[in-house]
């Protein structure tokens, strides 16, 4: 989907333009704002493809705002508009990089023509930055999602690279996944930390970010269906480094084992024990990636009584041994 920003001081105009834009396949309005300053803020923090910019605004003119936006990202396409034709403003807008200048009232045929031409000039690659992630959530199978995350992570990094625009892309992906799934229970600071580490060479961090996003969405959806799961999931989160089992969860949360097993299977498509192991395995990969711990040290951190049992569980869920995983980390660092 192409992301469109609509900038106009008049709320009704913004709403009307947004409706027309979203009638054209492949486009969605990411934000509607009332000033040039707000438009600049959106373009700094989000990935935007097109801007429809009102030229005459009270605080900062469309010319000034467009100039700054082009400085942020020269690839953003700007389409200017105003209430009446003004030769001087038209020249200024084209000088700062506007692709067209429209006069109000703006009708659907004009919007449709502009957007269709834009698609021809800016064909999207076949890569869908959200598709695989959303499928992982829609399928309601957390173990399947866990297995797909490393490949999705590599695919995202291959397409966005590393840099300022990459940070916007990762923020956009995170926001979109959470928004589409109406997920509100997540730690914004944790997401920002993951993104910052990923952009500074800690490439495996993206894998941890994606699991966090998907897990947050699963938990949010599960709690909406069965509010009692809020206590269960909170208990697991708070005690994930301890030796917890299905019996301890049932005992401490005061719920029937049979009922818990049924609703957990419906919402996560795995057992409670599988869920606990998956969470522990992701933490194990973080510990192996960023802390100089040997196998017994990681096993101890996660309350696995025997290193051999930890290694067995690790291989089951990651389809590779701990040694093979660590070797992969070394290769990534060396760029092999």
Image (cartoon, rainbow, N blue to C red):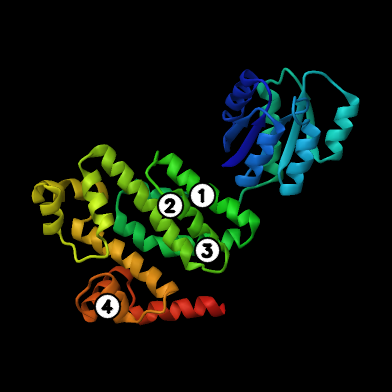
Mark 3, other Cα within 10 Å: few <14 / some 14–19 / many ≥20: some
In the rendered image, which residue does mark 3 sit on? 197
The residue positioned 42% from the left and 61% from the top of the image is 208
Q: Secondary structure at mark 3?
A: helix
Q: Nearer the viewer, mark 4 or mark 3?
A: 3
The residue positioned 65% from the left and 31% from the top of the image is 6
Residue 311 numbered mark, or none: 4
**Residue 309 lies in what quarter of the image?**
bottom left
Query: In the rendered structure, which disc, 3 or 1, sits on the residue that comes first in sequence?
Result: 1
Q: Is residue 68 above or below residue 330?
A: above
Residue 139 percent across, percent down from the top left? 33, 49
Distance (Cα) linking label 1 and label 2: 9 Å
Residue 241 percent across, percent down from the top left? 27, 65
Mark 4, other Cα within 10 Å: few <14 / some 14–19 / many ≥20: some
Query: In the rendered structure, which disc, 4 or 1, sits on the residue that comes first in sequence?
Result: 1
In the rendered image, which residue does mark 1 sit on? 173
Q: Nearer the viewer, mark 3 or mark 1?
A: 3
Distance (Cα) linking label 4 and label 1: 33 Å
């Amino acid at each position: 989907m192409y992301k469109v920003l609509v900038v106009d001081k008049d709320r009704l105009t913004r709403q009307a333009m947004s409706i027309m834009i979203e009638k054209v396949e492949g486009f969605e309005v990411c934000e509607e704002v009332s000033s040039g300053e707000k438009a600049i803020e959106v373009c700094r923090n989000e990935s935007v493809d097109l801007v429809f910019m009102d030229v005459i605004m009270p605080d900062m003119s469309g010319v000034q705002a467009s100039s700054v936006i082009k400085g942020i990202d020269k690839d953003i396409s700007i389409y200017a508009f105003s209430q009446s034709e003004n030769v001087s403003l038209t020249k200024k807008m084209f000088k700062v990089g506007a692709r067209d200048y429209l006069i109000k009232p703006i009708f659907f045929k004009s919007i449709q023509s502009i957007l269709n031409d834009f698609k021809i000039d800016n064909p999207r690659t076949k890569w869908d930055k959200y598709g695989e992630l959303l499928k992982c959530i829609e399928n309601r199978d957390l173990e399947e999602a866990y297995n797909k995350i490393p490949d999705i992570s590599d695919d995202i990094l291959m397409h966005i690279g590393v840099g300022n625009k990459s940070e916007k892309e990762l923020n956009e992906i995170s926001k979109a996944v959470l928004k589409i799934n109406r997920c509100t229970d997540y730690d914004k600071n944790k997401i920002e930390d993951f993104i910052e580490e990923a952009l500074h060479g800690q490439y495996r961090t993206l894998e941890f970010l994606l699991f966090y996003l998907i897990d947050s969405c699963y938990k949010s959806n599960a709690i909406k269906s069965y509010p009692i799961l809020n206590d269960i999931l909170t208990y697991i989160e708070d005690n994930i480094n301890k030796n917890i089992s299905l019996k301890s969860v049932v005992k401490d949360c005061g719920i029937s084992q049979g009922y818990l097993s049924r609703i957990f299977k419906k919402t996560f498509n795995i057992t409670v024990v599988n869920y606990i192991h998956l969470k522990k395995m992701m933490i194990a990969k973080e510990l192996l990636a960023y802390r100089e711990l040997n196998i017994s040290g990681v096993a101890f951190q996660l309350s696995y009584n025997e290193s051999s049992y930890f290694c067995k569980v690790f291989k089951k869920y990651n389809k590779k041994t701990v040694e093979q995983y660590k070797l992969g980390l070394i290769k990534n660092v060396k760029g092999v």
